[in-house]
Amino acid sequence: MDYKKSGVDIEEGYRAAAHYKGLSEMTINGKSAVLGGIGGFAGLYSLKEFLSGAGEMEEPVLVSGTDGVGTKLDIAFKMKKYDTVGIDCVAMCVNDVLCVGARPIFFLDYLACGKLDADVAAEIVKGVAVGCRETGSALLGGETAEMPGFYDVGKYDIAGFSIGIIDRKKIVDGSKICEGDALLGISSSGVHSNGFSLIRKIITDLNEDFGGMPIGMALLEPTRLYVKPVLSLMEKIEIHGMAHITGGGFYENIPRIFTKKEYTAVIRQGSWDIPPIFGRLAAGCYNTGSSGSLAQKQGLELLKVDAALRKQMFNTFNMGIGFVLALAPADVKAAKEHLDYRGFPSWEIGYVEKAAVKTEGLYIQ
């Protein structure tokens, strides 16, 4: 008996690591603060070198965020498409770090499986590298764990964490939010990476037609990366609060921006068009028995008339809004123009008000 016979192929691990090295290098641009490169016991990042090119910071504060992709991975396994879930992993972390106004600077990932296939692992990490490059994060390293008998063969799990940085005086903590602030919702790219334990129960045929493609492929559309457009917007206007719409949907995430609990978010129904994928999911939750375009239409109609279904959907999914900004009403027009120009459509979806009585922190008109 040796290690390979027990289920761990060291040579396949070496082959995967060779792929990772090139993928990591594509995330490092120009004169870098990364020291040593990938492959050591730990990743090294020089704050001195980073700060020398980052402009003056009086009190640099490091910001961390960690997350995974969750059961969306099961869709990727069944569709045999692995290159988007790595983007999801990065997005779930860096979008959270962004919520306080921080710029992500480096990222590490953790990949676990039952039996390592270096080519599949490289496809997953390729997505991680794309997400890192798109957000200015150096892929500093990671870990690949092969655990035979613990994970089923062909199954992978991925998680990661992001480290960002911000000057203390620029932290966006919600303390500047006031009554009358506008809530600007930025479009999502689809379902993102939440609610898939439910989705997997209500979408049983991943080859069901969805606008000319299998619905499984539509569900794998990666989470949007909001870092660059929002950071550049922060250079122009003051943002009072930010929310990444992840697990728990609107009801759990938008109230997290309030440091003063007397405030509540008022969301206006119909202020944006809910994408068809959420109509299909609503029909599945309601158990209409329909599929395809008919289910999409039925679901969107049900959302207008069924308050319980609407509450469930807005408490589970992003409903087409992946990121929310609280800002002064006078800044809405400039913010919309800035985001729209960069390919991130946005809508004024509501406002902040003082609650006369205790609320959940959000209600939908």
Image (cartoon, grey):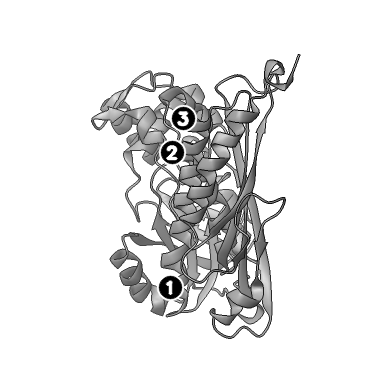
How far across and how far down the image is residue 327, in percent? 48, 73
Q: Residue furthest left?
A: 212
CA distance separating discs 3 and 2? 9 Å
Residue 319 in view here: yes
Please tell me which residue is depicted at 39% across the width and 23% down the height of the picture. Answer: 206
Q: Which mark is residue 83?
A: 2
Assign a secondary structure to mark 3: helix
Q: Residue furthest right?
A: 1
CA distance separating discs 1 and 2? 27 Å
Please tell me which residue is depicted at 41% across the width and 31% down the height of the picture. Answer: 81
Q: Residues within 10 Å of mark 2 (few under 14, many from 20)?
A: many
Q: Which mark is residue 76?
A: 3
| Tally of numbered discs | 3
- Is 286 or 230 nearer to us in this picture? 230
Q: Is residue 297 above or below residue 37?
A: above
How far across and how far down the image is residue 190, in percent? 39, 43
- Is 121 or 346 nearer to us in this picture? 121
CB atoms at circles 1 and 3 under 8 Å apart?
Answer: no
Of marks 1 and 3, which one's residue comes earlier in the chain?
A: 3
128 displayed left or right of 215: right
Q: Which residue is mark 1?
A: 232
Assign a secondary structure to mark 1: helix
Please tell me which residue is depicted at 54% across the width and 64% down the height of the picture. Answer: 242
Q: Is residue 152 above or below residue 282?
A: above
Of marks 3 and 2, which one's residue comes earlier in the chain?
A: 3
Q: Nearer the viewer, mark 3 or mark 2?
A: 2
